[in-house]
Image: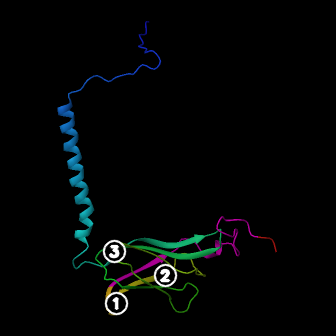
Amino acid sequence: MTTLTATAPLGAAMTAPARRPGRSRALFLGLAAALVVAGGVLLLAPLAQRGGDGPMLTLEGGGFVFNYRIAEATYGLVARVERTIPAGTRIITAFDDPAGGPPIVEEQVARVGLTKLVLKSPPVDGVVAGKPYAVTVRMLSPEGEEIGRLETSFTSNIDQSVMPKAPLTTGPGYQPPRPN
């Protein structure tokens, strides 16, 4: 069996076969123009959808977050904002307190152009597996009128009893805790 190989002297430039520049350039420019138009449509489509009379918020996900390294459990919630929010809108979130008592209420002011809400509760205690815990997100206009509401509930599949009693690590780099 004979193998043929082509070699070039060191430092010699390898060149590609000549192409017809007119056809390739036209194809490239046509594809580039199509991509620019499609990209513009994709970027503007969400802006066009941000009006109307549909719901103000749509739940994207959420649940309980168990951070065993710092022995902490919290609620986490992500919601998509479907319509334009007026400047100064207040977002009031009420989380059921798993330990009992009144709901845990968190409040913040929405920034202009907000498209997604990422909400987190302060640390909670007493989460029981299989029990639903209610969460309500209300959006109030600067005048105090409710302009949006999202009600949902989260159920954990594990008890908080699996969490350590004290943090396993401390500090921003998860250093081991100092001995007492």
In the rendered structure, which amino acid carries the disc numbered 1?
Pro
Pointer 3 local density, CA inside 10 Å: few below 14, some 14–19, many at least 20: few
Marks 3/2: CA–CA distance: 30 Å
Picture residue at 34% right of the left edge, 90% below the top:
142
Residue farthest to the right, as pictured: 180
- Using the image as rendered, state which of residue 24 and residue 120 is in the foreground: 24
- Report which residue position mark 2 lands on: 133
Marks 1/2: CA–CA distance: 29 Å
Is residue 11 shown left or right of residue 177?
A: left
Pointer 1 local density, CA inside 10 Å: few below 14, some 14–19, many at least 20: few
Marks 1/3: CA–CA distance: 15 Å
Can you give x and y, in whole percent of width and height, for residue 69 in the image? 65, 68
Can you give x and y, in whole percent of width and height, for residue 66 in the image? 58, 71
Secondary element type, mark 1: loop
Kindly check if marks 3 and 2 are in contact, taking CB atoms under 8 A apart as contact.
no
Residue 24 to residue 44: above or below: above
Residue 132 to residue 146: above or below: above
- Report which residue position mark 3 lands on: 113
Can you give x and y, in whole percent of width and height, for residue 57 in the image? 34, 77
Does residue 125 show up magenta in the picture?
Answer: no
Can you give x and y, in whole percent of width and height, for residue 121 in the image? 52, 80
Q: Nearer the N terminus, badge 1 or badge 3?
A: 3
- Location of the C terminus by quadrant is bottom right
Residue farthest to the top, as pictured: 1
- Using the image as rendered, state which of residue 164 and residue 13 is in the foreground: 13
- Location of the N terminus by quadrant is top left
Kindly check if marks 1 and 2 are in contact, taking CB atoms under 8 A apart as contact.
no
Quadrant in the picture for residue 30:
top left
Does residue 157 show up magenta in the picture?
Answer: yes
